[in-house]
Image: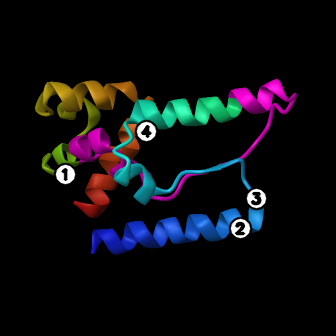
Amino acid sequence: GATQGKEASSHVAMEVALATQPNLVLVSEEISEKHMSLRDVVCLVADVICVRALHGKSYGTVIIPEGFLVAVPECRVMMGEIANLPQGCGVEQAMVLLSDFGKALLKSFPTYIQNQLLLYRMDNG
């Protein structure tokens, strides 16, 4: 099921982390258990970047597992709405059909991510 896929992607992320020693690994299960919002996750990543910059390190690695957005509560709601859109629905049509919440959240992503979320829906819907 969907949980097995999420767990598998986090396991892959952890295996990659062991091999690469990144500065941050986002684990879907942890994000979900802590009910972290998208803002919380963005702040976590930004904090790691700022601390590294203070130490003169303007580089680093963050590992984000496949399907990560499903672990973020508000994204899970939006993706549920996207899953109910008609097949072949584009961004413009989605903006008409989504709730105000879903529309606002989808708009907060760059255009290429908006398109990917709708394509993902077409591949898995």
Disc 2: which residue: 18
Q: Is residue 76 magenta?
A: yes
Disc 4: which residue: 113
**How far across and down, in percent of the image, does residue 11 sit?**
53, 71
Q: Residue at x 17, y 44 (%)?
A: 81
**What residue range appears in magenta?**
50-79
Q: Secondary structure at mark 2?
A: helix
| Mark closest to the chain's N terminus, 2 or 1 | 2
Q: Secondary structure at mark 3?
A: loop
Amino acid bearing label 1: Ala
Q: Given contact means CB atoms under 8 Å apart, are the residues at marks 2 and 3 in contact? A: yes
Q: Residue at x 28, y 38 (%)?
A: 74
| Mark closest to the chain's N terminus, 1 or 4 | 1
Amino acid bearing label 3: Gln
Answer whether residue 95 is visible to the viewer in this image: no
Q: Residue at x 51, y 58 (%)?
A: 65
Give left or right: position of 36 versus 56.
Answer: left
Which numbered tag is attached to residue 21?
3
Q: CA distance from mark 1 to mark 4?
A: 15 Å
For marks 2 and 4, give the one nearer the viewer: 2
Amino acid bearing label 4: Ile
Disc 1: which residue: 83
Q: Is residue 41 magenta?
A: no
Q: CA distance from mark 4 to mark 3?
A: 27 Å
